[in-house]
Image (cartoon, rainbow, N blue to C red):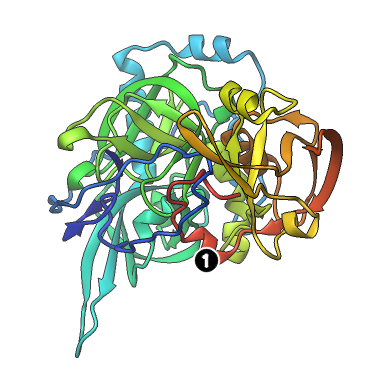
Amino acid sequence: MLILCALGLAMVVAGCDAADDRASAANAPAAAQATSTAQVAVTPAANAPAGQAPAAQAPAAQAPTQVGSAGGGLTTAPSGGAPAAQAAQVGTSTDTVIRVYRDWRPSTVAVISSVVQPGFRSEPQPAGTGTGFMIDDQGHILTNNHVVADADRLEVTLADGTTLPARLVGRDSRFDLAVIRAAVPADRLRPTTLGDSDQLQVGEQVVAIGNPYGLEGTVTTGIVSGRRPVVAEPEGDGVLVNAIQTDASINPGNSGGPLLNGRGEVVGVTTLGLMPNGGQAGLNFAIPINNARRILNDLIASGSYPHPFVGIATAEITPTIAAQLGLPVQQGLLVQDVTRGSAAAQAGLRAGSQQQDAGARRVAAGGDVIIAADGNPVRRPEDFLSYLELNKRAGDALTLTIIRDGQQQDVSLTLGQRPATQAQSQPGAGQPGR
């Protein structure tokens, strides 16, 4: 089962986060292509006493550049150079892990969320704990949305054991990211350096720092095992686009922590772990830091990010479907449903209306077939979703190349903003909504 790795202090519900006890169930069209999403069991968990890590000096030999944001400059690593050569400079020795931990443990915090139960003179009750890390000199801290969602009160615990109140600045359920802010004393501010997750190589060493099961300041290491176009979260419509797969252990309480490369640059935000029967399987996932950088300024400035929304459900065309439906193409997306009032509806996209069996699947035939987005071929629903999320935002123009009644044509539309109700719903048996 896929676990959202925020540790609950009471009852861990659908992904190790007791602060989020929502149960969502919105059904996508039955013919839509399913995206693999595992069910998560309810598991009790308790917080362990906060540990303390030795103090460390600020990292040396950094060559950052400053990127302006509404809340202060983000420290980013300089780009350039061949990825393989960069990885080779670091090596995979134990010394690398020791150095990365020593330099960046002070930047990592425990995030504690509390909720107020209804009742007379109710006091905030601990609900969950996760991890976060400092991203600028203004006290902004990046973490997972599911760590802080529905919390009435937030606190952070620094590496030296100091606990400070924090407030929510902005959050995004789609990318499962949130920014909080605390008045961290100047002498304990240790902003991380944000790397370039597009430069990560499969096989490259990575280091995760977090608070698994309440054990603060825990470090694990492994390699980048692969990159996955889309990994759907076990609840809601959260997606990890171009997800980083790693065998570095990610357990409940690690959510929102930094995944660092051997140079000490943050390349991901640890989020999901596959834990069959409650044990580690070495299949863990992190959000690429480039995805976070895409939305950080919006979260800090306005509290949210306008994700693009086309308003369609689609099914992947397989050779079997193409042959049985007599389609003129061997790959692409069959439009299965069009949301009323959406950008797709306004542009006149047509959904299939003839239910037909194609092998073991049942699809709605007769609708438009999408073969490209802005000239980029799309074969699977994941391709389309990735292109939209990594290249577009609400209000942008999009040109879809479609086949209708055997003829190829281009359809232009202006992307809408993903509805709030859509952002909180579960796509069910269909592919992630677009």
The answer to whether residue 387 is left or right of residue 35 is right
The answer to whether residue 300 is left or right of residue 25 is right
Q: Is residue 286 above or below residue 124?
A: above
Q: Quadrant of residue 286?
A: top left
Amino acid carrying label 1: it is: Thr
Q: Is residue 119 above or below residue 141?
A: below
| Residue 56 appears anywhere in the view | no
**Which of 253/278 is in front?**
278
Q: Is residue 209 above or below residue 302?
A: above
Q: Quadrant of residue 399?
A: top right
- Residue at 42% across / 10% down in the picture? 91
Q: Position of residue 262 (x, y in %)?
A: 43, 21
Q: Position of residue 40 (x, y in %)?
A: 26, 46
Q: Is residue 68 above or below residue 403?
A: below
- Residue at 51% across / 48% down in the picture? 175
Element type where label 1 sits in the image: helix
**Which of 400/70 is in front?**
400
Q: Which residue is mark 1?
A: 421
| Residue 125 appears anywhere in the view | yes
Q: Position of residue 275 (x, y in %)?
A: 23, 35
Crowding at mark 1 (Cα within 10 Å: few <14, some 14-19, many 20+): few
Q: Position of residue 186 (x, y in %)?
A: 44, 54
- Residue at 60% across / 43% down in the picture? 314
Classify the position of the N terminus by image quarter: top left
Q: Quadrant of residue 3?
A: top left
**Which of 49/337 is in front?**
337
Q: How many marks?
A: 1
The answer to whether residue 47 is left or right of residue 151 is left
